[in-house]
Image (cartoon, rainbow, N blue to C red):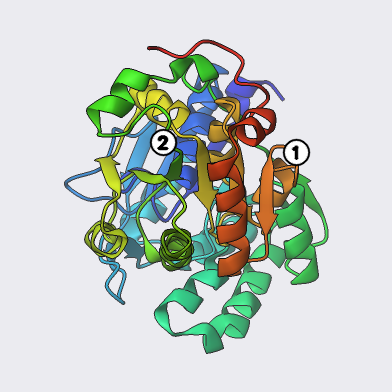
């Protein structure tokens, strides 16, 4: 089939109203499909204040704010009459669902009733989110719902082999392909390191910088991050914390850390400069299915200390390009961070020797 004959309907719980790694991947996918001549239409909740302009034709579906203090995200009611009419006019021959929510379930039912193949992409370990809101007892129920969702699809793709293996172990699907990720090396590279930028933020040239990169939400392991930093302080390990990103937990994180450098949301070359100006990335999250931030950091020749969890364990070579630590092991994280803070040669070896020249 020629690309111009393809009509793809994509269903997402969040396509552009809050920026995250999942919808960045979807927007890049849509951009690629459009360049190939594929017809694409996206169905997702929307807001009046989206974080960025959507790629492609975006159809708004009715939604309500997510409860439990996460009102920046929205839950679709399902397939409204207006959305069904739009689908009937678009006549997709492939349906792509990106989240196991009510909208995704209804999209699968709509497609199966019409004999249209359904592809599901896995982006986030939603079942792990419950642990951060005192609802861990509901995790088996969520996994059961996810199992029903993914088993109704004709094909499933995960962003990493470790995520695919988790899906097999949870019996979500046994026929799983890999849809991996890439990065823009014109943005993320060692040459972006800028000592003047560090100095402007009160960071000395020889001060080891521990970076956090990502959306500031509790499910990124902010509590684990802070407790590990507490141990470094108790051990009198010289360091500085650099936080890149925004989110609803920023006030909590900033207050809890006390003396971190918060530079907010960064993009493009500014983001590449901030990442390359770290000395190590600390990523304690267990919710990632891939972890774009880990790959972006490694492209800047910066070592990564991460939880031994999905995504990171396929990217970080333990003892070579960084350290992998058991999830939630505060002392283990502190030990790894201390080693990298106190040994510049170790940082250089793990970063591949910092190929490229920093800006002085």
Circle 1 residue: 320
Q: Residue at x 55, y 25 (%)?
A: 300
Q: Residue furthest bottom?
A: 137
Percent across and percent down for residue 96 are: 57, 47
Write down the quadrant of residue 197 in the picture: top left
Percent across and percent down for residue 72 are: 26, 59
Quadrant of the drawing holding the N terminus: top right
Q: Residue furthest front?
A: 236
Disc 1 to disc 2, C-alpha distance:
22 Å
Percent across and percent down for residue 5 are: 61, 25
CB under 8 Å between discs 1 and 2: no
97 or 300: which is nearer to us? Answer: 300
Q: Residue at x 69, y 42 (%)?
A: 315
Mark 1 or mark 2: name the one nearer the start of the chain: 2
Q: How many marks?
A: 2
Residue 216 image label: none
Percent across and percent down for residue 129 are: 49, 70
Q: Does residue 175 appear to the left or right of 124 in the view shown?
A: right
Quadrant of the drawing holding the C terminus: top left
Circle 2 residue: 207
In the structure shown, which secondary structural element does the residue marked by tag 2 occupy? loop
In the structure shown, which secondary structural element does the residue marked by tag 1 occupy? loop
- The crowd level at tag 1 (other Cα within 10 Å; few <14, some 14-19, many 20+) is some
Q: Does residue 174 appear to the left or right of 272 in the view shown?
A: right
276 or 230: which is nearer to us? Answer: 230
Labels 1, 2: front one = 2
Write down the quadrant of residue 51 in the picture: top left
51 or 109: which is nearer to us? Answer: 51
Q: Is residue 134 above or below residue 112?
A: below
Q: From this viewpoint, is residue 343 visible?
A: yes
Q: From this viewpoint, is residue 94 visible?
A: no
């Amino acid at each position: 089939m020629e690309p111009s004959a393809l009509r793809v309907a994509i269903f997402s719980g969040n396509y552009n109203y809050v920026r995250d790694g999942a919808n960045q991947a979807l927007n890049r996918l849509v951009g690629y499909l459009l360049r190939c001549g594929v017809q694409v239409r996206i169905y997702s909740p929307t807001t009046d204040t989206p974080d960025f302009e959507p790629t492609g034709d975006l159809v708004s579906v009715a939604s309500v704010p997510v409860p439990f203090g996460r009102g920046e995200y929205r839950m679709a009611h399902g397939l409204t009459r207006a959305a069904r009419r739009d689908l009937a006019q678009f006549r997709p021959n492939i349906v792509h669902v990106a989240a196991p929510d009510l909208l995704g379930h209804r999209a699968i039912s709509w497609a199966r009733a019409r004999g249209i193949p359904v592809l599901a992409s896995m982006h986030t370990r939603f079942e792990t989110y419950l642990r951060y809101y005192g609802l861990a007892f509901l995790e088996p129920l969520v996994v059961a719902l996810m199992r029903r969702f993914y088993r109704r699809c004709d094909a499933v793709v995960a962003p990493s082999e470790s995520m695919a293996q988790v899906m097999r172990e949870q019996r979500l699907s046994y026929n799983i392909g890999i849809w991996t990720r890439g990065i823009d090396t014109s943005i993320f590279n060692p040459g972006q390191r800028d000592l003047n930028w560090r100095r402007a933020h009160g960071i000395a040239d020889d001060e080891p910088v521990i970076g956090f990169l990502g959306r500031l939400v509790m499910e990124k392991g902010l509590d684990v991050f802070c407790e590990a930093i507490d141990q470094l302080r108790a051990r009198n390990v010289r360091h500085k914390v650099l936080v890149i990103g925004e989110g609803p937990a920023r006030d909590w994180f900033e207050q809890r850390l006390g003396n971190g450098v918060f530079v907010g949301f960064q993009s493009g070359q500014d983001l590449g400069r901030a990442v390359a100006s770290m000395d190590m990335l600390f990523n304690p999250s267990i919710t990632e299915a891939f972890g774009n931030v880990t790959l972006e950091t490694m492209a800047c020749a910066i070592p990564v200390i991460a939880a031994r969890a999905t995504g990171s364990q396929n990217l970080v070579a333990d003892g070579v390009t960084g350290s992998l630590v058991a999830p939630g092991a505060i002392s283990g994280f502190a030990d790894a961070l201390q080693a990298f803070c106190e040994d510049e040669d170790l940082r250089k070896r793990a970063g591949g020797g910092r190929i490229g020249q920093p800006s002085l």
